[in-house]
Image: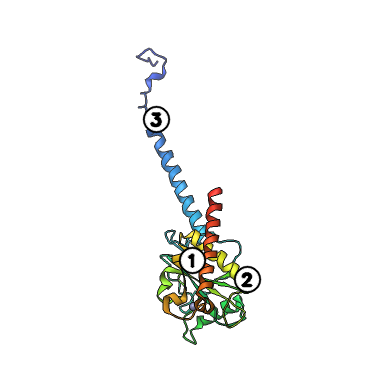
Amino acid sequence: MVTLSNGGDGFSAVPPRRKRGPLRALLPWVVLTLSLIASCNIRVREARTGGEYPSWLPGAEIEMPEYVREDFLTKNPYSRPGTYLRKIDGVVIHYVGNPGSTANANRNYFEGLADGQNGTYASSHFIVGLQGEALQCVPLTEIAYASNNRNADTISIEVCHPDKGGQFNDMTYQRVAELTGWLCWKFALDPQEDVIRHYDVTGKLCPLYYVEHPDAWEALKGDIAAVKARLTAEAAET
Ligand SMILES: [Zn+2]
């Protein structure tokens, strides 16, 4: 016969477990939850960038406007070296210099440089075509070979034109203004200071018409500024 000495309810023969404080009891759950959240975040980020680019690059995790058609060049030393674009301090406007050529033809020209046979290094982040189409050839996380010593901190836009004078047609002009305005808004650039011509980098007559007609260049920058102002106002409303 077993006699319980303390005459209680009989269960007290088992020594009472030391009670853990409520916070201590929760700790493993807190750690588990935090680590789950962290791993989900990493997975989401990797999905957005393809896991290819660190998120601190200014051009990483940027959602492009719907009118931009992505058609990236194959990575190669001549037109898409894959070098990180670590800063985005400006936008450089160019003209293709090949009257009547399409955005797609110019994109294929860059792609064709990949074999290195003619030793040319050239590309552009965007090409705006004669119908106002906007092709993206290089991600905003990588440099393009367009603007000489400003390749490392600018986004480049090559623009198609109907004749050798180099003036943009209406559809092309509107798209250049829209896309450049969007870039200024997205990367907090000043349309007056940070949007430049290739001419402003090297003195090359590019984009020809807007070098020969400074008024037209100023007007284009004004239209770019108006787009930035509109996008800023729209973002403030939502
Ligand atoms: Zn140029």
Q: Which residue is pictured at 45% across the width and 74% down the height?
A: 81
Q: Position of residue 51 (x, y in %)?
A: 48, 61
Give amino acid for label 2. Asp
Vertical position of residue 20 compared to residue 13: above or below: below
Front residue (pair 236, 1): 236
Image quarter (top left, top right, bottom left or bottom right) of the N terminus: top left
Mark seen at residue 170: 2
Residue identified by numbered label 3: 22
Q: Is the CB atom of the residue marked by disc 2 within 8 angstroms of ligand 1's nearest atom?
A: no
Q: Which residue is pictured at 49% across the width and 50% down the height?
A: 40
Which of labels 1 and 3 is toward the front? 1
Q: Which residue is pictured at 57% across the width and 61% down the height?
A: 65
Q: Position of residue 230 (x, y in %)?
A: 55, 56
Whichever of labels 1 and 3 marks the residue nearer the N terminus, that label is 3
Vertical position of residue 16 compared to residue 237: above or below: above
Front residue (pair 174, 45): 174
Q: Position of residue 73 (x, y in %)?
A: 53, 74
Residue most toward the top? 7
Residue identified by numbered label 1: 140
Residue most toward the front? 215
Tag 2 secondary structure = helix
Give amino acid for label 1. Leu
Is the residue under label 2 in contact with that under label 3 (CB below 8 Å)? no
> Could you give the CA–CA distance between mark 1 and mark 3, rounded to whole angstroms?
50 Å
Label 3 crowd (10 A; few <14 / some 14-19 / many >=20)? few
Mark seen at residue 131: none
Whichever of labels 3 and 2 marks the residue nearer the N terminus, that label is 3
Tag 1 secondary structure = loop
